[in-house]
Image: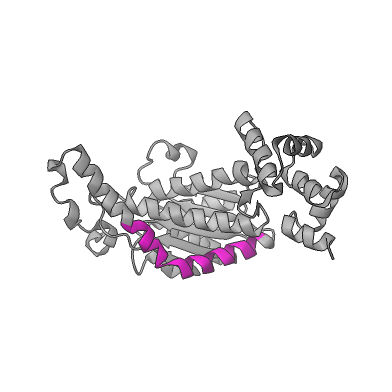
Amino acid sequence: MVNLEVLETEKRNENSLKIDEGDFLSIIETINNEDKNVALAVEKEKLNIARLTEEAFNQLKKGGRIIYIGAGTSGRLGVLDASECPPTYGVDPTLVMGIIAGGQNAMFKAKEGAEDSEEFACEDLKNVNLSENDMVIGIAASGRTPYVIGGLKYANSVGASTGSIACVSNSKIGDVAKFKVEVITGGEVVQGSTRMKAGTAQKMVLNMISTTCMIKLGKVYGNLMVDVQPTNEKLVVRAKRIVKQALNVDDETSVKLFEASGGNVKVAIIMGLLKLSKDDAFKLLEKNDGIISKSVSDYNR
């Protein structure tokens, strides 16, 4: 028998007891006031988030992957974060992966019962050839989803590293994972609707994990996302603007460098910074793991 009473996410929120009697503005204000507390709750876990993220980065450096696993809203958030990494940072779609209980169809339509099986998670991880170099991060607002627990147990059994993100204290998934994050967001405006504050907290933590790893992998120069893939008109404009901002040059110069680089933002920046040819800029970046600042330091030695 599941005892929801002990979960902070299932507590009745005293600030929204009469929310159904409010007008549109008062309802919005109540939701907004509760949302203001989410970032503060995340802040309290920043050290644990940093530890988990550093472990994830170390696994990536060993040739592994980050694999999020979850059910329902938590699973969808993992898939969302993973799916945004390739277009934003130009990484392989398998570098950061999201697995949701019930498979791809569960992204759009809830698949009841899928989250109750530990075995389903084991099969899903076997299907992506989980290895000891990978990092599996289980996501569950309640901290007790069997699917996530099963996935973390299997990951531990093959020697992979494991992390967890929950919105309750003393979470069951935290007991299984090697690195745990527990962001206590409290009772929802609508009791039990953890797609709200808990979901927002999970999204914030996932943003921190993936963005920090991408920065450390050299996908960012300053605060510019220099590995953006110019696959549509908007992204081409953005890429040219990044070259302009990184080099502090005019539009004409940035466009010329971008075109001369073959549409590669990093190469264009190195060409502009060091006055190198396209080929020499590419070789220098390749030698320095694609990291611009490291490449510049190496060249100036």
Which residues fall within the magenta stretch?
A: 37-60
Membership of 294 in magenta stretch:
no
| Image height of 211 relative to 265, above or below | below
Residue located 24% across and 59% down the image: 4
Residue 245, given in percent of the width and then of the height, sits at 66, 45
Which quarter shows the C terminus?
Answer: bottom right
Q: Nearer the viewer, residue 8 or 106?
A: 8
Residue that sits furthest to the top in the current view? 233
Q: Nearer the viewer, residue 299 or 252?
A: 252
Numbered-mark total: 0
Judged by its main secondary structure, the magenta piece is: helix
Residue located 37% across and 51% down the image: 199
Locate residue 249: give its quadrant.
top right
| Image height of 216 relative to 21, above or below | below
Q: What colour scheme was applied to this rendering of the protein?
A: one colour
Residue 16 is left or right of residue 120, and the answer is: left
Residue 209 is left or right of residue 277, and the answer is: left
Residue 118, given in percent of the width and then of the height, sits at 44, 56
Residue 46, given in percent of the width and then of the height, sits at 46, 66
Would you say residue 34 is visible in this rendering? yes
